[in-house]
Amino acid sequence: MAQVQRIAIMGDEAVALAVKQAKVDLVAAYPITPQTIIVERLSEYVADGELDAAFIQAESEHSALSICVGAALAGARVFTSTCSQGLALMHEIVYAASSMRIPMVMTIVNRSLNAPLNIHCEHGDVMPERDSGWVHLFAANVQEAYDLTFIAFKLSEREDVMLPVSVNLDAFILSHSIESLIPISDEDAARFLPPREYKLALDFDNPITHGTMALPDTYMEFKMQLKEAVERAKSVYPEIVEEYARISGRKYWYFNSYMADDADAVVMVLGSTYGTLKTAARELREKGLKVGVIGLTMFRPFPEEQLVDALKGVRAVVVMDRAYGYGGLGGQLYTDVVGALYRNGIRIPAKNVVFGLGGRDFKLDEAEAILKMAAKGARDGGFDTHVQWWGVRA
Amino acid sequence: MGLIEVRWHGRGGQGVVTGSNLLARAAIQEGKYAQHFPEFGPERAGAPVRSYTRISEDPIEIHCGIYEPDVVVIIDPVMSRYTKDYCYGLKPGGDIVLNYIPSGDDEVVRWTRNNGYKLHAVDARKISIEEINREIYNVPMLAALLRVKGFCKMSTLEEVLAQRFKDKVLEMNLRISRRAYEEVKTIVG
């Protein structure tokens, strides 16, 4: 493992660097707001000759993703990124990409959806794509956004998976912030991600059909294959993170976990809030409060068995969502966790805290309050309410 | 050194964000951990803007705003004269760095002393006009900050500047930052 010095880098630039090192063949993107610096840097890499790829400026996000689908079918390694309204406009092709089993990576810089106009951090943009059959990974910091990009390509292109993968990072908090990063070497990147091989690539001499019509007698079989592929993505993931650990020294798992093993109460979350909760939990542990934190790296496929296992012995959970399922039972992560607990026979109190919509900051003292709330739930054997919108003015 | 939090004030167009950015880069260059993040909103030249830096010897995992900084740096010379308005949340015993040199009977000196803060001042505006006939505040203010707080070595800042700027722009930034580094004074220590 090569020792490389830590560098200072912005989240967007870290993703662009990983995409360059992954030697993509094509990047397609639509360049205006809410697009990010990720594609700006990639266009510079291409223009400067540092990345030998086609950079296609599409006329919309819908087209950008469509271009990626087409190029991937021709055998190219492809990348795009978007967020917020841009992702909403891609929605139709998001589903096409997974059902056509297109390997590709898309970075989603998580931002709120209109209205009101906002574009600050929220997970409300990716949630409409939750059930699409994509693999959805979440980064807790800039290093993870970089590392997960490699892991995403590897997972996406595996012959027994062949699915699009999204890497999510919190807008502004990670995308526009500078943190330190330990990059992997170009040689290690090339070893981890050799050029893509695709047996079914479009070929004029041996024509085949992709994206065909499937009437009621075959449609469900296509969808069953999608379901199975998504489940395989979960079962092969440990091999991939193990291989990545060998070159990087950084071991990823389905989730990050801080002192959840012996905790009375655990708080669960997606994205960069994990670090804030962990910092608060460390202080509370020193004061004798047995709290833990779990931050999911893999959100889809949902790591049900692994989470249930991690929650053994835990007496209460607070699940935090930076998005909401309006008219439903709560935020998306909460309903997953509650469902997983119920069907695995674990009847512990679980509360949903909805926070940080539209970029509202979630401070260290608030993280401490949530952890104490979880600990109180464990002590009392229940919570006052199922869902709380955190910090909303009356 | 524990976790240090710095809040930068200035106006859109003065390089407030770049000042904070360069501090984080210099700290990471020295093997420390750092975070830099600007405050986001509509970008307008002349409007008051803020930017933030965290520095630590240990990995920084927290991802939220800074509300109780250890240091406030005001890079705009006019805003510097309204010191009190920009020091909200400053930790007891915290440091203020201004871009004008208050006289001994200036009200800000009494206010700083009464509140138990430390006050450092450099006339980055004068230095910049005299040296390069321009008004560049962010880099000299950063140099002044490094002199009084010692977060990083001046030579590291120079390395980081050389990565960021070239030729004449680099030479100008080096000239004004070196002079600010020499001329910064601690008014209330």
Image (cartoon, rainbow, N blue to C red):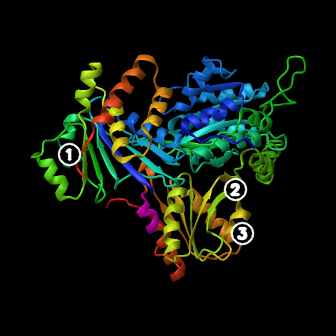
Point 48% across, 32% down: residue: B160
Q: What residue is shown at x 24% (from left), y 55% (from top)?
A: B117
User: The disc labelled 1 sits on which kind of residue?
Assistant: Thr
Camera-near label (2 vs 1) is 1
Q: Secondary structure at mark 3?
A: helix
Residue A216 in picture, x, y percent from top left: 79, 42
Q: CA distance from mark 2 to mark 1?
A: 48 Å
**Residue at which label 2 appears:** A254
Q: In this rendering, is residue A225 above or below B161? A: below
Q: Which residue has dot 1 on it? A: B83
Left or right placement of residue A299 versus residue A274 in this view: right
Residue extending farthest front: B182
Towards the viewer: A224 or A322: A322
Please report, as a chain letter, where disc 3 is located.
A
Chain containing the residue with disc 1? B
Which quadrant, please, contains the C terminus of chain A? bottom left
Q: Is residue B177 above or below residue A11?
A: above
- Residue A267 at x, y percent in the picture: 55, 66
Mark 1 surroundings: few (<14), some (14-19) or many (≥20) residues within 10 A = some
Q: Answer whether residue A337 is magenta in the image.
A: no
Q: Is residue A53 visible?
A: yes
Name the spot of residue B29 as percent of width and height, x first: 53, 39
From the image, give the main secondary structure of the stretch colored magenta. Answer: helix
